[in-house]
Each structure stands twice: as C-alpha cells, then as structure tokens.
C-alpha cells in the first residue's frame, strides 16, 4: 500500500588482531542470543512429533520442507537430533549451556574441556586458568536447571478483537506452517513439572531454507548456509521490555518484527508476500497478535 520500509545487512571487518591476520577461509556469522523462556518445554517435545512435522522432500507440495539437523551429543558421542541454537546445532539444554560457557566466554566444563583458542593466539595460553575444568558439574547443572525452568509469559489480550483478527491473518498467510502453534510435551523424569503440558511455542524446531537473503555462507552439521531453525514466537512481544532492543533474526539485522518478516524468503516467500499484500489495517492486526505472544 506504499508504506516504506528499509532493510539492512551487516558487513564484517576484522582489524588490528594481536595474533596476525585471519585465515583466508575464515567465516563471519553474527549471532543475537536467542530467548531462553520455555526451552525446557521444547526439550521435552517427543521426537515422534518432530518426525510428524518433518517433510524434507515436500511430499505434500505446500512449498515447506522442514527437516531436523543431526548433531553430536558430546556426552555420548552419538549423532542425535538437534533442537537448540539458530541452526539447531545443540541437542539438549545442558549441552547448549555448556557450549555457551566455552564458546561465548571461554569457560570449560566436563562436556567441553578444551577452550576454543587457536595456536596463533599465543597470549591465551599464558592467561590464568580457572581450573580443569573451570566450571563444575554442579554449577553446570544449576545453570541448566535455571534455563530449563524459565517460565513462558502469558499471552496478553488474547481475546481482544484486533488480536483475534491478527491470529486469523497469521494462519491465512500460512505462517503457522513453520511457526507451528501447539505441541504436547513428553515425559521428563528429571522435570515432571514440564511433562504432559499443552504448549503454544509457535515453532516446529525444524530447519527451513530461508532463501539467499539470509544465507550466512556457513553450514553447521547438516544445516546449510540458507537453513535456519524456526525460532519460537512466545514472548516476542516482551523483547523490548526485557532487552531494550528489537533486533531480530540471527544477526540482529531486523530492527522490528516487520523487517524480520520482510527478510523471509525461500520456503517462507509466500508468507512474506502475503504480508506485503495486506492492507495497513491487516498488518496492524497481525502485529498486534504477534506482540500479544
């Protein structure tokens, strides 16, 4: 309808590195930390449910072909289904926590006993160590417990006419083909309070090809550069209240929900086009629904 939008993409540059230039094949891919609410519930969704939703060959012909990433469970050495991270590169909340410890702040654990320094980073080898490993299993388990039990905020204004209209538009645009609304959690003997719950996270936990515009040139296990896990939408309306920003997508390039939608391509192109074709009032209703989550 003529409403203007502008989109931005990050450009990366590394300067004045104390250990020499980066390798010619070094890859850059920015990351905004994903929301933690409800990840314990997502951890208990049965594998059978993911298998029910997966359609890697688009057998039903709807243009959506979600599939899971197969990753390493470092505790067992086995290849398992990934659930967490922007490309579903981690299989469990505990491993996600341990990977963040070592990858984000250089703290080793029993799961990742070696930090991620390279031989070129000579000064790092002389830096003080916090132990071997630096974080105990007790602390790792406590942080995992905290993350797994972070509650999901209740939807606000769920029965408001504008929100209900937006929900219908969300479905009509087939956004729920990937942002699947409802699941029932399985059994978690360690966290019985998470078991057998009907939840509405708005994700299928699967990888989808989001087109060349969101490609980061970096594959992770089975996930290609263009594939990303469907992020849950619960809590999205409170992002600014909690974080004081609305930087969406994996690298924060989208400054609003609208910009995030406009970056959708590949399997989500039809839903993006449906959003563009909406009137201003319809877009307002859709955004009211999303901000109620």
Image (spheres, rainbow, N blue to C red):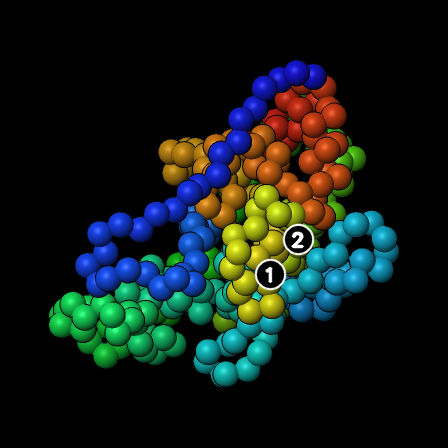
- Name the side, left or right, on which 62 lies relative to 129: right
Q: Which sits in the foreground, 25 or 31?
A: 25
- How many neighbours does mark 2 have within 10 angstroms: few (below 14), some (14-19), or many (20 or more)? many
Question: Marks 2/1: CA distance?
Answer: 8 Å
At x 26% / y 74%, what residue is drawn? Answer: 119
Q: Tell me residue 114's x, y (percent).
A: 31, 76
Residue 281 placement: quadrant: top right
Q: Tell me residue 249's x, y (percent).
A: 52, 44
**Who comes first in sequence, dot 2 or dot 1?**
2
**On screen, residue 87 above or below 212:** below
At x 71% / y 58%, what residue is drawn? Answer: 66
* Image quarter (top left, top right, bottom left or bottom right) of the C terminus: top right
Residue found at the very far front of the displayed protein: 24
Q: Secondary structure at mark 1?
A: loop
- Name the side, left or right, on which 112 lies relative to 41: left
Q: Tell me residue 146's x, y (percent).
A: 39, 59
Q: Tell me residue 227's x, y (percent).
A: 61, 56
Residue 49 placement: quadrant: bottom right
In the rendered structure, find residue 101 and report the number of the disc placed on it.
Answer: none
**On screen, residue 141 above or below 41:** below
**On screen, residue 229 above or below 254:** below
Q: Are marks 2 and 1 in contact (CB under 8 Å)?
A: yes
Residue 5 placement: quadrant: top right
In the rendered structure, find residue 209 and report the number of the disc placed on it.
Answer: 2
Q: Which sits in the foreground, 224 or 166?
A: 224
For label 1, the residue is 224
């Amino acid at each position: 309808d003529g409403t203007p939008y502008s989109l931005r993409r990050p450009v990366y540059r590394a300067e004045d590195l104390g250990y020499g230039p980066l390798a010619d094949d070094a890859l850059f891919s920015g990351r905004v930390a994903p929301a933690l609410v409800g990840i314990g519930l997502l951890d208990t969704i049965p594998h059978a449910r993911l298998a029910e939703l997966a359609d890697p060959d688009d057998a039903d012909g709807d243009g959506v072909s979600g599939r899971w990433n197969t990753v390493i469970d470092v505790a067992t050495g086995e290849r398992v289904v990934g659930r967490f991270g922007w490309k579903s590169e981690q299989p469990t909340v505990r491993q996600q926590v341990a990977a963040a410890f070592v990858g984000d702040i250089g703290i080793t654990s029993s799961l990742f006993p070696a930090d991620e320094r390279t031989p070129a980073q000579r000064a790092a080898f002389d830096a003080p160590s916090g132990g071997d490993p630096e974080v105990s299993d007790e602390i790792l388990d406590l942080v995992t417990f905290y993350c797994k039990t972070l509650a999901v905020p209740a939807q606000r204004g769920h029965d408001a006419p504008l929100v209900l209209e937006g929900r219908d538009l969300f479905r009509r645009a087939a956004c729920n083909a990937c942002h699947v609304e409802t699941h029932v959690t399985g059994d978690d003997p360690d966290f019985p309070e998470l078991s057998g719950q009907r939840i509405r996270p708005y994700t299928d936990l699967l990888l989808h090809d989001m087109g060349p515009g969101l490609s980061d040139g970096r594959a992770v296990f089975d996930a290609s550069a263009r594939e990303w896990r469907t992020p849950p939408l619960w809590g999205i309306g409170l992002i600014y209240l909690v974080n004081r920003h609305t930087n969406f997508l994996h690298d924060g390039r989208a400054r609003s929900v609208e910009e995030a939608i406009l970056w959708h391509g590949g399997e989500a192109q039809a839903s993006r086009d449906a959003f563009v074709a909406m009137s201003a009032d319809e877009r307002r209703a859709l955004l009211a629904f999303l901000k109620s989550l």
